[in-house]
Amino acid sequence: MENIKNLIVGCGFSGATLAYKIATELNEPVTIIDAKNHIGGNCYDYTDETGVCVHQYGTHIFHTNLKDVWDFVSQFTKWNPYMHEVRGYIDGQEVPIPFNLNSIHQVFPKSIADKLEEKLISRFGFNVKVPILELRKVGDEDLTFLADYIYEKVFLHYTLKQWGMKPEELDPAVTGRVPVYISRDNRYFQDTYQGIPLNGYTPVIEKMLAHPLITVRLNTDFNQIKETVSYERLFYTGPIDEFFNYELGELPYRSLKFDFVTFNKPYFQSGSVINYPNNYTFTRIGEYKYFLDDKTDKTVVSFEYPQAFELGKNERYYPIVKDENQTLYNRYLEEANSLSNVYFLGRLGDYKYYDMDKAIARALALFEEIKGR
Ligand SMILES: Cc1cc2nc3c(=O)[nH]c(=O)nc-3n(C[C@H](O)[C@H](O)[C@H](O)COP(=O)(O)OP(=O)(O)OC[C@H]3O[C@@H](n4cnc5c(N)ncnc54)[C@H](O)[C@@H]3O)c2cc1C
Protein backbone atom coordinates (compact mmCIF):
# COMPACT_ATOMS: atom_id res chain seq x y z
CA MET A 1 0.00 0.00 0.00
CA GLU A 2 1.45 3.36 -1.07
CA ASN A 3 1.13 6.18 1.45
CA ILE A 4 0.29 9.60 0.04
CA LYS A 5 -0.02 12.70 2.17
CA ASN A 6 -2.18 14.79 -0.17
CA LEU A 7 -3.80 13.04 -3.10
CA ILE A 8 -5.58 15.23 -5.66
CA VAL A 9 -7.74 13.63 -8.33
CA GLY A 10 -7.92 15.76 -11.48
CA CYS A 11 -5.36 18.08 -13.10
CA GLY A 12 -7.81 20.82 -14.16
CA PHE A 13 -7.80 24.33 -12.72
CA SER A 14 -9.44 23.15 -9.48
CA GLY A 15 -6.90 20.43 -8.73
CA ALA A 16 -3.89 22.41 -9.95
CA THR A 17 -4.80 25.46 -7.84
CA LEU A 18 -5.06 23.35 -4.72
CA ALA A 19 -1.82 21.47 -5.49
CA TYR A 20 0.05 24.75 -5.89
CA LYS A 21 -1.29 26.18 -2.63
CA ILE A 22 -0.58 23.04 -0.59
CA ALA A 23 2.96 22.71 -1.95
CA THR A 24 3.91 26.37 -1.71
CA GLU A 25 2.15 27.41 1.51
CA LEU A 26 2.00 24.22 3.57
CA ASN A 27 5.27 22.82 2.20
CA GLU A 28 3.66 19.42 1.99
CA PRO A 29 4.04 16.84 -0.79
CA VAL A 30 1.17 16.46 -3.23
CA THR A 31 0.42 13.72 -5.72
CA ILE A 32 -1.98 14.84 -8.43
CA ILE A 33 -3.41 12.31 -10.87
CA ASP A 34 -5.52 12.46 -13.99
CA ALA A 35 -7.19 9.73 -15.97
CA LYS A 36 -6.42 11.61 -19.16
CA ASN A 37 -3.06 11.75 -20.91
CA HIS A 38 -2.76 15.51 -20.40
CA ILE A 39 -3.00 18.14 -17.69
CA GLY A 40 -5.44 21.05 -17.82
CA GLY A 41 -8.75 19.19 -17.67
CA ASN A 42 -11.36 20.85 -19.83
CA CYS A 43 -9.13 23.88 -20.35
CA TYR A 44 -6.44 21.87 -22.13
CA ASP A 45 -5.09 23.53 -25.27
CA TYR A 46 -2.21 22.81 -27.64
CA THR A 47 -0.61 24.33 -30.71
CA ASP A 48 -1.33 22.05 -33.66
CA GLU A 49 0.66 21.55 -36.86
CA THR A 50 -0.91 24.62 -38.49
CA GLY A 51 0.45 26.83 -35.68
CA VAL A 52 -2.99 27.55 -34.21
CA CYS A 53 -3.53 27.18 -30.46
CA VAL A 54 -6.58 24.89 -30.28
CA HIS A 55 -8.79 24.39 -27.21
CA GLN A 56 -9.51 20.67 -27.23
CA TYR A 57 -12.75 20.94 -25.25
CA GLY A 58 -14.20 24.03 -26.91
CA THR A 59 -13.52 27.76 -26.79
CA HIS A 60 -12.36 29.02 -23.36
CA ILE A 61 -12.22 32.72 -22.51
CA PHE A 62 -10.97 33.83 -19.12
CA HIS A 63 -13.10 36.55 -17.56
CA THR A 64 -13.58 37.59 -13.96
CA ASN A 65 -14.45 40.35 -11.54
CA LEU A 66 -12.47 38.60 -8.81
CA LYS A 67 -9.22 40.54 -8.55
CA ASP A 68 -7.62 37.95 -6.25
CA VAL A 69 -8.27 35.21 -8.84
CA TRP A 70 -6.95 37.39 -11.69
CA ASP A 71 -3.82 38.16 -9.64
CA PHE A 72 -3.41 34.50 -8.74
CA VAL A 73 -3.50 33.33 -12.38
CA SER A 74 -1.36 36.30 -13.49
CA GLN A 75 1.55 34.86 -11.49
CA PHE A 76 1.75 32.15 -14.13
CA THR A 77 1.13 34.05 -17.35
CA LYS A 78 0.96 37.29 -19.22
CA TRP A 79 -2.29 37.93 -21.03
CA ASN A 80 -3.55 38.70 -24.49
CA PRO A 81 -6.08 41.41 -23.55
CA TYR A 82 -8.82 39.81 -25.59
CA MET A 83 -12.43 41.01 -25.28
CA HIS A 84 -14.83 38.29 -26.40
CA GLU A 85 -17.67 38.93 -28.83
CA VAL A 86 -20.20 36.40 -30.06
CA ARG A 87 -22.42 36.83 -33.08
CA GLY A 88 -25.47 34.80 -34.00
CA TYR A 89 -26.48 33.96 -37.56
CA ILE A 90 -30.04 35.29 -37.56
CA ASP A 91 -32.17 35.93 -40.64
CA GLY A 92 -29.10 35.93 -42.86
CA GLN A 93 -27.03 38.33 -40.76
CA GLU A 94 -24.43 37.98 -38.04
CA VAL A 95 -25.77 39.99 -35.11
CA PRO A 96 -24.28 40.62 -31.67
CA ILE A 97 -25.24 38.07 -28.98
CA PRO A 98 -26.53 38.71 -26.36
CA PHE A 99 -29.09 40.52 -28.50
CA ASN A 100 -28.49 44.21 -27.78
CA LEU A 101 -29.41 47.63 -29.18
CA ASN A 102 -26.95 47.16 -32.05
CA SER A 103 -28.61 43.84 -32.90
CA ILE A 104 -32.01 45.55 -32.87
CA HIS A 105 -30.79 48.25 -35.26
CA GLN A 106 -29.22 45.61 -37.48
CA VAL A 107 -32.31 43.43 -37.95
CA PHE A 108 -35.21 45.92 -37.86
CA PRO A 109 -36.03 48.99 -40.02
CA LYS A 110 -34.93 52.27 -38.38
CA SER A 111 -38.41 53.42 -37.33
CA ILE A 112 -39.14 50.16 -35.49
CA ALA A 113 -35.65 49.95 -33.99
CA ASP A 114 -35.85 53.54 -32.66
CA LYS A 115 -39.22 52.88 -31.05
CA LEU A 116 -38.03 49.64 -29.43
CA GLU A 117 -34.87 51.29 -28.14
CA GLU A 118 -36.84 54.09 -26.55
CA LYS A 119 -39.35 51.73 -24.93
CA LEU A 120 -36.65 49.43 -23.60
CA ILE A 121 -34.66 52.26 -22.07
CA SER A 122 -37.67 53.99 -20.52
CA ARG A 123 -38.98 50.72 -19.06
CA PHE A 124 -35.74 49.10 -17.86
CA GLY A 125 -33.03 51.76 -18.06
CA PHE A 126 -29.75 51.71 -19.98
CA ASN A 127 -26.93 49.20 -19.62
CA VAL A 128 -29.06 46.49 -18.03
CA LYS A 129 -29.60 42.88 -18.99
CA VAL A 130 -33.20 41.74 -19.00
CA PRO A 131 -33.83 38.00 -19.06
CA ILE A 132 -35.82 37.13 -22.10
CA LEU A 133 -38.63 35.37 -20.25
CA GLU A 134 -39.10 38.51 -18.13
CA LEU A 135 -39.27 40.79 -21.18
CA ARG A 136 -42.08 38.66 -22.53
CA LYS A 137 -44.21 39.26 -19.44
CA VAL A 138 -44.34 43.09 -19.73
CA GLY A 139 -47.54 43.28 -21.80
CA ASP A 140 -46.48 46.10 -24.18
CA GLU A 141 -47.30 45.23 -27.82
CA ASP A 142 -43.94 46.32 -29.24
CA LEU A 143 -41.88 44.79 -26.46
CA THR A 144 -43.86 41.57 -26.78
CA PHE A 145 -43.08 41.59 -30.51
CA LEU A 146 -39.38 42.06 -29.70
CA ALA A 147 -39.46 39.43 -26.97
CA ASP A 148 -41.14 36.93 -29.27
CA TYR A 149 -38.62 37.69 -32.02
CA ILE A 150 -35.65 37.15 -29.73
CA TYR A 151 -37.26 34.17 -28.07
CA GLU A 152 -37.86 32.50 -31.42
CA LYS A 153 -34.76 33.55 -33.36
CA VAL A 154 -32.07 33.61 -30.69
CA PHE A 155 -33.17 31.51 -27.78
CA LEU A 156 -35.71 28.78 -28.48
CA HIS A 157 -34.02 26.66 -31.12
CA TYR A 158 -30.57 27.17 -29.63
CA THR A 159 -31.89 26.00 -26.27
CA LEU A 160 -33.65 23.01 -27.80
CA LYS A 161 -30.40 22.00 -29.47
CA GLN A 162 -28.22 22.79 -26.47
CA TRP A 163 -30.29 21.01 -23.84
CA GLY A 164 -32.47 18.70 -25.87
CA MET A 165 -35.55 20.10 -24.12
CA LYS A 166 -37.93 23.10 -24.01
CA PRO A 167 -36.86 26.30 -22.20
CA GLU A 168 -39.84 26.00 -19.83
CA GLU A 169 -38.47 22.70 -18.59
CA LEU A 170 -35.25 24.39 -17.54
CA ASP A 171 -34.39 26.07 -14.29
CA PRO A 172 -34.64 29.93 -14.50
CA ALA A 173 -30.93 30.06 -13.62
CA VAL A 174 -30.25 28.65 -17.07
CA THR A 175 -32.88 30.56 -19.05
CA GLY A 176 -31.81 33.73 -17.23
CA ARG A 177 -28.39 33.35 -18.78
CA VAL A 178 -29.85 34.43 -22.13
CA PRO A 179 -30.59 38.14 -21.75
CA VAL A 180 -31.53 41.12 -23.87
CA TYR A 181 -28.79 43.65 -23.24
CA ILE A 182 -30.00 47.24 -23.34
CA SER A 183 -26.65 48.60 -24.40
CA ARG A 184 -24.36 49.23 -27.37
CA ASP A 185 -21.69 47.04 -25.79
CA ASN A 186 -21.09 44.10 -28.14
CA ARG A 187 -18.90 42.20 -25.69
CA TYR A 188 -20.13 38.86 -24.42
CA PHE A 189 -18.74 39.52 -20.92
CA GLN A 190 -18.56 42.79 -19.03
CA ASP A 191 -16.07 41.59 -16.40
CA THR A 192 -13.24 43.92 -15.37
CA TYR A 193 -10.57 41.34 -16.18
CA GLN A 194 -10.69 39.41 -19.45
CA GLY A 195 -8.10 37.71 -21.59
CA ILE A 196 -6.42 34.63 -22.96
CA PRO A 197 -3.14 33.42 -21.41
CA LEU A 198 -0.45 34.55 -23.84
CA ASN A 199 0.92 31.03 -24.33
CA GLY A 200 -2.36 29.21 -23.80
CA TYR A 201 -3.97 27.54 -20.77
CA THR A 202 -1.87 24.37 -20.62
CA PRO A 203 1.39 26.25 -19.87
CA VAL A 204 -0.42 28.06 -17.01
CA ILE A 205 -1.33 24.74 -15.38
CA GLU A 206 2.14 23.37 -16.18
CA LYS A 207 3.68 26.24 -14.22
CA MET A 208 1.28 25.76 -11.32
CA LEU A 209 2.36 22.13 -11.09
CA ALA A 210 6.10 22.76 -11.61
CA HIS A 211 7.05 22.47 -7.95
CA PRO A 212 9.44 19.94 -6.44
CA LEU A 213 6.80 18.86 -3.91
CA ILE A 214 4.22 18.13 -6.63
CA THR A 215 4.16 14.78 -8.44
CA VAL A 216 1.94 14.54 -11.51
CA ARG A 217 0.68 11.17 -12.72
CA LEU A 218 -1.23 11.09 -15.98
CA ASN A 219 -3.15 8.13 -17.44
CA THR A 220 -4.03 7.27 -13.85
CA ASP A 221 -7.66 6.71 -12.98
CA PHE A 222 -8.47 6.92 -9.27
CA ASN A 223 -10.69 3.85 -9.60
CA GLN A 224 -7.71 1.80 -10.73
CA ILE A 225 -5.39 2.84 -7.91
CA LYS A 226 -7.75 3.36 -4.99
CA GLU A 227 -7.20 -0.10 -3.50
CA THR A 228 -3.42 0.34 -3.63
CA VAL A 229 -3.04 3.78 -2.02
CA SER A 230 -3.80 5.33 1.34
CA TYR A 231 -3.92 9.08 1.87
CA GLU A 232 -4.06 11.56 4.69
CA ARG A 233 -6.21 13.89 2.59
CA LEU A 234 -8.01 13.29 -0.67
CA PHE A 235 -9.22 16.15 -2.89
CA TYR A 236 -11.55 14.85 -5.53
CA THR A 237 -12.39 16.92 -8.64
CA GLY A 238 -13.88 13.97 -10.50
CA PRO A 239 -17.62 13.15 -10.60
CA ILE A 240 -19.02 12.78 -7.07
CA ASP A 241 -21.51 10.09 -8.14
CA GLU A 242 -18.71 8.01 -9.63
CA PHE A 243 -16.75 8.25 -6.37
CA PHE A 244 -19.68 6.60 -4.59
CA ASN A 245 -20.07 3.96 -7.32
CA TYR A 246 -23.39 5.53 -8.42
CA GLU A 247 -25.02 3.93 -5.38
CA LEU A 248 -27.81 6.59 -5.34
CA GLY A 249 -28.05 6.83 -9.13
CA GLU A 250 -26.30 8.78 -11.88
CA LEU A 251 -26.14 12.59 -11.92
CA PRO A 252 -27.27 13.71 -15.39
CA TYR A 253 -25.05 15.80 -17.64
CA ARG A 254 -25.21 17.25 -21.13
CA SER A 255 -22.37 16.33 -23.43
CA LEU A 256 -20.88 17.80 -26.61
CA LYS A 257 -19.18 16.48 -29.71
CA PHE A 258 -16.57 18.70 -31.36
CA ASP A 259 -15.81 18.21 -35.04
CA PHE A 260 -12.49 19.91 -35.71
CA VAL A 261 -11.81 20.98 -39.29
CA THR A 262 -8.73 22.67 -40.75
CA PHE A 263 -9.35 25.00 -43.67
CA ASN A 264 -6.69 25.91 -46.17
CA LYS A 265 -7.32 29.65 -45.91
CA PRO A 266 -6.33 32.27 -43.34
CA TYR A 267 -9.83 32.78 -41.87
CA PHE A 268 -13.11 30.87 -41.93
CA GLN A 269 -15.53 33.25 -40.19
CA SER A 270 -15.71 36.82 -38.90
CA GLY A 271 -14.87 36.12 -35.25
CA SER A 272 -13.97 33.46 -32.70
CA VAL A 273 -17.53 32.27 -32.04
CA ILE A 274 -20.57 32.36 -34.34
CA ASN A 275 -23.80 30.83 -33.04
CA TYR A 276 -26.27 29.10 -35.34
CA PRO A 277 -29.54 29.06 -33.37
CA ASN A 278 -31.81 28.25 -36.32
CA ASN A 279 -29.70 26.40 -38.86
CA TYR A 280 -27.93 23.05 -38.79
CA THR A 281 -27.71 20.64 -35.86
CA PHE A 282 -24.55 22.18 -34.41
CA THR A 283 -25.01 25.16 -32.07
CA ARG A 284 -21.88 27.13 -32.84
CA ILE A 285 -18.58 27.25 -34.67
CA GLY A 286 -15.42 28.25 -32.82
CA GLU A 287 -12.39 29.56 -34.73
CA TYR A 288 -9.35 29.37 -32.49
CA LYS A 289 -6.75 31.64 -34.11
CA TYR A 290 -8.65 34.75 -32.97
CA PHE A 291 -7.80 34.17 -29.31
CA LEU A 292 -4.05 34.73 -29.64
CA ASP A 293 -4.15 36.34 -33.07
CA ASP A 294 -2.17 33.43 -34.57
CA LYS A 295 -0.75 34.46 -37.95
CA THR A 296 -1.09 31.31 -40.05
CA ASP A 297 -2.10 30.42 -43.63
CA LYS A 298 -4.59 27.85 -42.38
CA THR A 299 -7.31 28.02 -39.78
CA VAL A 300 -8.84 25.53 -37.35
CA VAL A 301 -12.50 25.55 -36.39
CA SER A 302 -14.77 23.31 -34.34
CA PHE A 303 -18.41 22.56 -35.00
CA GLU A 304 -20.12 21.97 -31.66
CA TYR A 305 -22.88 19.34 -31.46
CA PRO A 306 -24.75 18.97 -28.15
CA GLN A 307 -25.48 15.39 -27.13
CA ALA A 308 -26.90 13.36 -24.29
CA PHE A 309 -24.20 12.25 -21.86
CA GLU A 310 -23.78 8.50 -21.82
CA LEU A 311 -21.48 6.90 -19.30
CA GLY A 312 -18.38 5.45 -20.93
CA LYS A 313 -19.27 6.88 -24.36
CA ASN A 314 -18.60 10.60 -24.12
CA GLU A 315 -17.57 13.39 -21.71
CA ARG A 316 -19.55 15.16 -19.01
CA TYR A 317 -19.81 18.86 -19.90
CA TYR A 318 -22.76 20.67 -18.32
CA PRO A 319 -24.62 19.56 -15.18
CA ILE A 320 -28.35 19.63 -15.97
CA VAL A 321 -29.84 22.20 -13.61
CA LYS A 322 -33.08 20.71 -12.25
CA ASP A 323 -34.46 20.33 -8.74
CA GLU A 324 -34.45 16.54 -8.83
CA ASN A 325 -30.79 16.51 -9.90
CA GLN A 326 -29.85 18.97 -7.17
CA THR A 327 -31.68 16.76 -4.64
CA LEU A 328 -29.71 13.74 -5.80
CA TYR A 329 -26.48 15.73 -5.60
CA ASN A 330 -27.39 16.85 -2.05
CA ARG A 331 -27.77 13.22 -1.01
CA TYR A 332 -24.28 12.49 -2.33
CA LEU A 333 -23.03 15.59 -0.54
CA GLU A 334 -24.40 14.27 2.75
CA GLU A 335 -22.38 11.10 2.25
CA ALA A 336 -19.35 13.17 1.31
CA ASN A 337 -19.64 15.25 4.48
CA SER A 338 -19.49 12.12 6.58
CA LEU A 339 -15.97 11.39 5.30
CA SER A 340 -13.49 13.27 7.43
CA ASN A 341 -10.49 13.44 5.08
CA VAL A 342 -12.11 13.59 1.64
CA TYR A 343 -13.00 16.89 -0.01
CA PHE A 344 -14.96 17.37 -3.22
CA LEU A 345 -14.53 20.35 -5.48
CA GLY A 346 -14.57 21.43 -9.12
CA ARG A 347 -17.30 21.29 -11.69
CA LEU A 348 -17.68 17.50 -11.36
CA GLY A 349 -17.07 17.20 -7.61
CA ASP A 350 -19.56 19.99 -6.80
CA TYR A 351 -21.90 19.11 -9.71
CA LYS A 352 -22.02 22.75 -10.65
CA TYR A 353 -21.28 24.79 -13.75
CA TYR A 354 -18.21 26.84 -12.86
CA ASP A 355 -16.45 29.29 -15.10
CA MET A 356 -12.68 28.97 -14.71
CA ASP A 357 -12.48 31.87 -12.27
CA LYS A 358 -15.16 30.36 -10.03
CA ALA A 359 -13.47 26.97 -10.07
CA ILE A 360 -10.21 28.62 -8.99
CA ALA A 361 -11.99 30.74 -6.35
CA ARG A 362 -13.61 27.62 -4.92
CA ALA A 363 -10.21 25.85 -4.72
CA LEU A 364 -8.61 28.89 -3.06
CA ALA A 365 -11.45 29.04 -0.50
CA LEU A 366 -11.20 25.32 0.22
CA PHE A 367 -7.47 25.71 0.80
CA GLU A 368 -8.16 28.43 3.41
CA GLU A 369 -10.63 26.05 5.09
CA ILE A 370 -8.30 23.06 5.32
CA LYS A 371 -4.93 24.69 5.89
CA GLY A 372 -5.31 24.75 9.67
CA ARG A 373 -6.50 21.14 9.85
C1 LIG B 1 -17.73 23.77 -23.73
C2 LIG B 1 -17.26 24.53 -22.52
C3 LIG B 1 -16.80 25.82 -22.68
C4 LIG B 1 -16.37 26.54 -21.56
N1 LIG B 1 -15.94 27.82 -21.76
C5 LIG B 1 -15.53 28.53 -20.69
C6 LIG B 1 -15.13 29.88 -20.87
O1 LIG B 1 -15.15 30.43 -21.97
N2 LIG B 1 -14.72 30.57 -19.77
C7 LIG B 1 -14.69 29.99 -18.51
O2 LIG B 1 -14.30 30.67 -17.55
N3 LIG B 1 -15.06 28.71 -18.34
C8 LIG B 1 -15.49 27.98 -19.39
N4 LIG B 1 -15.87 26.67 -19.20
C9 LIG B 1 -15.77 26.07 -17.86
C10 LIG B 1 -14.37 25.45 -17.57
O3 LIG B 1 -14.12 24.41 -18.48
C11 LIG B 1 -14.36 24.94 -16.12
O4 LIG B 1 -14.51 26.03 -15.25
C12 LIG B 1 -13.08 24.23 -15.71
O5 LIG B 1 -12.76 23.22 -16.59
C13 LIG B 1 -13.24 23.67 -14.32
O6 LIG B 1 -12.06 23.02 -13.93
P1 LIG B 1 -12.13 21.74 -13.00
O7 LIG B 1 -10.73 21.48 -12.60
O8 LIG B 1 -13.14 21.92 -11.93
O9 LIG B 1 -12.70 20.57 -13.93
P2 LIG B 1 -12.03 19.84 -15.17
O10 LIG B 1 -11.29 20.78 -16.02
O11 LIG B 1 -13.10 19.02 -15.79
O12 LIG B 1 -10.97 18.85 -14.51
C14 LIG B 1 -11.34 17.65 -13.86
C15 LIG B 1 -10.29 16.60 -14.18
O13 LIG B 1 -10.51 15.45 -13.37
C16 LIG B 1 -10.15 14.32 -14.13
N5 LIG B 1 -10.82 13.14 -13.56
C17 LIG B 1 -12.16 12.94 -13.43
N6 LIG B 1 -12.38 11.74 -12.86
C18 LIG B 1 -11.17 11.18 -12.61
C19 LIG B 1 -10.76 9.94 -12.05
N7 LIG B 1 -11.64 9.02 -11.62
N8 LIG B 1 -9.44 9.69 -11.93
C20 LIG B 1 -8.52 10.61 -12.39
N9 LIG B 1 -8.87 11.79 -12.94
C21 LIG B 1 -10.17 12.07 -13.06
C22 LIG B 1 -10.66 14.65 -15.53
O14 LIG B 1 -9.99 13.86 -16.50
C23 LIG B 1 -10.33 16.13 -15.63
O15 LIG B 1 -9.07 16.33 -16.23
C24 LIG B 1 -16.36 25.94 -20.28
C25 LIG B 1 -16.83 24.64 -20.13
C26 LIG B 1 -17.30 23.95 -21.23
C27 LIG B 1 -17.85 22.57 -21.03
Image (cartoon, rainbow, N blue to C red):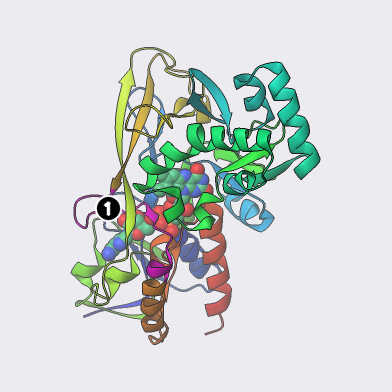
17 relative to 136, above or below: below
Q: Nearer the viewer, residue 30 or 165?
A: 165
Ligand 1 contact, mark 1 (Cβ < 8 Å) = no
Residue 210 seen in this snapshot:
no
Q: Looking at the picture, how far across and down is residue 219, in whole percent?
A: 24, 56
The magenta stretch is: 308-326
Looking at the image, residue 97 lies above or below residue 254:
above
Pick whichever, 210 or 306, lies toward us: 306
Residue at 36% across, 83% down? 335
Asked if residue 171 lies in the magenta stretch, the reply is no
| Picture quadrant where residue 240 is located | bottom left
At label 1, the amino acid type is: Phe
Report the predominant secondary structure element of the magenta stretch.
Answer: loop
Q: Which residue is mark 1?
A: 309
Query: What residue is shown at x 67% (from left), y 22% (from top)?
Result: 105
The image shows residue 8 at horizontal and vertical percentages of 38, 68
**Looking at the image, residue 46 lies above or below residue 248:** above
Query: In terms of depth relative to the viewer, which is nearer, 35 or 27?
Result: 35
Total tally of numbered discs in the picture: 1
Q: Is residue 31 visible?
A: yes
State the image coordinates of residue 269 (x, y, percent, origin top left). Answer: 46, 19
Q: Image check: 156 left or right of 371?
A: left
Magenta residue check for 310: yes
- Which quarter of the rendered picture does the N terminus lie within? bottom left
Q: Image point 35% across, 39% down: which residue? A: 56
Q: Residue at x 43, y 29 (%)?
A: 276
Against 77, is 348 above or below? below
Q: Quadrant of residue 341?
A: bottom left
